[in-house]
């Protein structure tokens, strides 16, 4: 018998059953990450995130899941809909609360309506959508599936949602043997520029590796706080220092840290996560400004790690228009939306159709500007 269950906490769902469904999927959908955000007070009602995971069970066995949250605002999502909320308000509609399916604070593409490997994906995806609509009808005005895959967005469009697009910059390992091998893809001027940037940044002592110590994790959290402080009310520090330490305990060698030291003092760092053939760049910050240090700590060290360990893709996160100049390709990202007010749904669907055309044009323009030469 198929049963849809909606929970009020991620800690209420058995961790082993949850992770068996996630399988090889995004690390940010794993139980230890989502339940940890709750347990350490990062994604809770006080911060505007109310856990509402939607699950599907077959004969008592968990077979599908959607990491859903009731949101009272749009912070920490990276799919920017503040203008949508304003438009809804002007038209006399409520926009919040809304039901968001995502990994909080993690703009990472993956299937978000996850079905256990080997099972009937269309069937159980439809059950999840049914469960999301049932959960939303309780107190929400829309459903928003953020950073889903292109194929998933297409399937959800066929179920009445409408897709929205943005783009990020990803690095792809095209069989490089060394960092210098990668640099050979650039013209000599760019090669020399990147080498100069690396030399200047490495005037500081830079250490990189997995299994960061508790002291390193606490330093990384200080850098994260420093970055958040630059963005005023938009830069709220959601993730606690204890949560960073928790990830170090449970993920261990899946965490990759890069830290720059001025003498013995850590002054900058980046926090990355490894799973499968991917490296995910998550958080960067510094307490001292040094030229080119951001590029070295965030990008070049991570690229070098990917090459040395055979990882295929480095996703450094949202933003950063300077990335394409350093060999990162523009990559379209997707989200899927239902507004429960029919008129608002139709209006925003029409708007996003034009927006998708603009995004596609911009991605094509940036890809044409990519300085990587054909191998």
Image (spheres, rainbow, N blue to C red):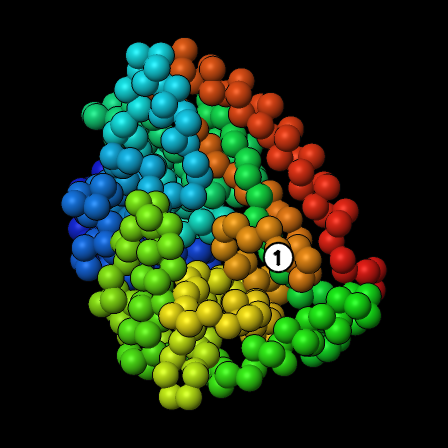
Q: Secondary structure at mark 1?
A: helix
Classify the position of the C terminus by image quarter: bottom right
- Identify the residue shown where x is 75% and y is 71%: 191
Vertical comparison of 207 with 189: above or below:
below
In the foreground, 220 or 8: 220
The residue at 18%/55% (across/down) is 41
Of the pair 356 and 153, the residue shown nearer to us: 356
Left or right: 273 in relation to 364: left
In this picture, residue 317 sits left or right of residue 145? right
One can see residue 102 in this view: yes
Residue 326, image x and y in percent? 67, 62
Q: Image quarter for residue 201?
A: bottom right
Viewport quadrant of the N terminus = top left
Residue found at x 53% / y 21%: 351
Residue sitting at x 66%, y 55%: 324
Which residue is at the far bottom? 263
Q: Residues within 10 Å of mark 1 (few under 14, many from 20)?
A: some
| Total number of numbered discs in the rendering | 1
Direction from residue 52 to residue 358 in the image, left or right: right
x and y percent of residue 83 in the render?
Answer: 41, 27
Look at the picture and state if 63 lies above or below 158.
Answer: below
Residue 58, placed above or below residue 306: above
**Residue 15, picture quadrant:** bottom left
Corner quadrant of residue 98: top left
Percent position of residue 214, x then y: 28, 79
Q: Which residue is disc 1 drawn over?
A: 323
> In x, y percent, where is residue 27?
41, 59
Whether residue 3 is visible, yes or no, is: no
């Amino acid at each position: 018998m198929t049963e849809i269950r909606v929970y009020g906490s991620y800690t209420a769902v058995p961790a082993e059953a949850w992770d068996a469904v996630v399988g090889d999927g995004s690390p940010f959908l794993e139980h230890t990450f989502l339940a940890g955000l709750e347990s350490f007070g990062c994604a809770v009602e006080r911060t505007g995130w109310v856990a509402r995971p939607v699950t599907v069970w077959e004969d008592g066995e968990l077979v599908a899941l959607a990491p859903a949250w009731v949101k009272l605002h749009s912070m920490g999502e990276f799919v920017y809909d503040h203008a949508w909320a304003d438009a809804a308000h002007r038209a006399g509609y409520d926009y919040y609360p809304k039901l968001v399916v995502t990994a909080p604070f993690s703009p990472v593409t993956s299937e978000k309506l996850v079905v256990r490997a080997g099972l009937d994906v269309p069937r159980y995806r439809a059950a999840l959508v049914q469960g999301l609509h049932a959960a939303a009808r309780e107190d929400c005005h829309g459903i928003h599936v953020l950073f889903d895959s292109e194929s998933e967005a297409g399937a959800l469009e066929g179920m009445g949602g409408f897709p929205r697009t943005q783009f990020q910059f990803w690095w792809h390992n095209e069989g490089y043997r060394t960092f210098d091998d990668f640099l050979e893809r650039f013209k000599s001027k760019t090669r020399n520029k990147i080498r100069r940037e690396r030399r200047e940044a490495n005037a500081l002592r830079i250490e990189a590796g997995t299994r960061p110590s508790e002291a390193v994790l606490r330093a990384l959290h200080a850098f994260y706080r420093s970055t958040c402080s630059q963005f005023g009310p938009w830069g709220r520090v959601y993730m606690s220092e204890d949560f960073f330490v928790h990830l170090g305990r449970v993920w261990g060698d899946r965490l990759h840290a890069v830290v720059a030291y001025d003498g013995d003092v850590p002054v900058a760092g980046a926090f990355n996560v490894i799973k499968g053939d991917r490296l995910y760049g998550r958080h960067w910050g510094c307490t001292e400004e040094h030229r080119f240090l951001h590029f070295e700590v965030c990008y070049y060290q991570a690229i070098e790690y990917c090459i040395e360990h055979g990882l295929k893709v480095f996703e450094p996160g949202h933003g950063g228009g300077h990335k394409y100049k350093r060999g990162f390709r523009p990559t379209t990202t997707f989200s899927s939306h239902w507004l429960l007010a029919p008129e608002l749904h139709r209006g925003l669907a029409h708007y996003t159709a034009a927006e998708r055309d603009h995004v596609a044009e911009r991605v094509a323009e940036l890809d044409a500007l990519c300085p990587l030469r054909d191998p």
